[in-house]
Image (cartoon, coloured by chain):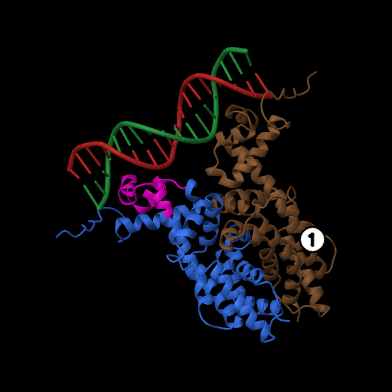
Chain colours: A brown, B blue, C green, D red
Amino acid sequence: MSERTKPANGGDPGDLEAEARILEAARQVFTRHGTSGARMQQIAAEAGVNQALIHYYFRTKQQLADRVFLEAVGRMSRGLAPALAAERTLEEVILRFVEGYIDAMRQTPFLPAYILSETLHHPERLEALMQQAMHTVPAAVGRRALDRVSALVDDAVARGVMRPLTPRQLLVSALALVAFPFVGRPILMPLLDMDEEDFSRFLDERRAELPGFLLHAIRP
Amino acid sequence: MSERTKPANGGDPGDLEAEARILEAARQVFTRHGTSGARMQQIAAEAGVNQALIHYYFRTKQQLADRVFLEAVGRMSRGLAPALAAERTLEEVILRFVEGYIDAMRQTPFLPAYILSETLHHPERLEALMQQAMHTVPAAVGRRALDRVSALVDDAVARGVMRPLTPRQLLVSALALVAFPFVGRPILMPLLDMDEEDFSRFLDERRAELPGFLLHAIRP
DNA sequence: GTCTATATGTTGATAGAC
DNA sequence: GTCTATCAACATATAGAC
């Protein structure tokens, strides 16, 4: 058989294949320490393999980092896009947006801060991604999102449930309100003296309050 | 004279003393690349000195990085604290808060993202800072800020200009609305297709719209 | 105070056995 | 596919002349 040989898993914990274990470990380490702060040795250790095997599967650190970053942006986009995609009124979109994003990011609470940090340190990666991947990534985000919001705003204003606000500002505000708790999590938790459990309750609270907060903010 | 000898400035551009030039260069490089991504060589080059001189003044990279981070947190706090400190109504505090923070961060637009990134990668630094520096830093931020907001909310609710919202949520929301444009700047600019000038106009727009947005959001 | 070497330690990456 | 051993390249830090 010329099939790609499946691993004998000659090693350690977890019954995932080595490649998958490496990728998962890479997610953890890159997310916590950033691309330049991450160490191949630590990834190897957490994956239960040795450094050489990482290079066998992913060639270079840079390629592995790019892979992790790309996946992260994808997951983030998939957390944001659905609410905007569906044909709904602004009120419904807001509700979906808040609940959808918070529910999605709860799974991977460091993701937003990681993406932000990487974008700060390596802006060229995002730019490259924006050009090439206008379709790969559910990049309804971006200008298309702005168009969508503009249309929703026009409709809501016409229906008299909203005062005329700049769509761009509204988009950023909505994004800010849902994303900031995650983006700022490493600061907010110690600052507001929260542990994991407190933070989780904080998110519940927010998920419930935020739609009303936003609706009040935009009504005439 | 036993005075500390002043430098002959035997070098390069800028008429600042070497120590100050190094510190300024360090701010630039650490802010853009993060502590682990920053290279002492680059700092030396941008300061117009050689690597050895950096160690002469700041001993180790870690110490220099700590110094830059500490200053950054200080500047950030000074951008946030004034609005909360003054004795005012919630409405006035909101106005001051929005205008004060946006005006302050305009000077150093990468600062919030840098602080966030560092806090993500080195949470221990912030924790250390929180304990020891409860007074060094204008750390009215934190629990004291929360108490302040609670009092303002109680008053506003009693006056009938606000519906009862969780103070913690309001604090995070207000922070989110002003900080996110800066924190997310590396993402927002390419995403919304803005250049420096566009971003500046965006901030003007926001500075004008945000107080009203927040006041609408909290009213009964 | 500031420079030119240079020592020292990491780290990403490869070679080659199994 | 997976491992051990090792290389080559940097990056931080120090020594010592001026």
For the residue pair A138 and A40, the one nearer the viewer reads as: A40
Residue range corresponding to the magenta coloring: B38-66
Q: Quadrant of the C terminus of chain B?
A: bottom right
The percent position of residue A151, horizontal first and vertical second, equals 79, 69
Amino acid on which disc 1 is placed = Ala
Residue A11 in the magenta stretch? The answer is no
Determine if residue B13 is in view.
no
For the residue pair A148 and A108, the one nearer the viewer reads as: A108
The percent position of residue B30, horizontal first and vertical second, equals 46, 53
Direction from residue A57 to residue C15 in the image, left or right = left
| Residue B142, image quadrant | bottom right
- The residue positioned 58% from the left and 83% from the top of the image is B89
Determine if residue B213 is in view.
yes
State whether residue B41 is above or below residue A54.
below
- The residue positioned 64% from the left and 77% from the top of the image is B209
Check the residue under mark 1 and report the chain it is in.
A
| Residue A203, image quadrant | bottom right
| Residue B169, image quadrant | bottom right
Q: Residue furthest right?
A: A87
| Residue indicated by mark 1 | A83
Tag 1: Cα neighbours inside 10 Å, few (<14), some, or many (≥20)?
A: many
Q: Which residue lies furthest to the bottom in this view?
A: B159
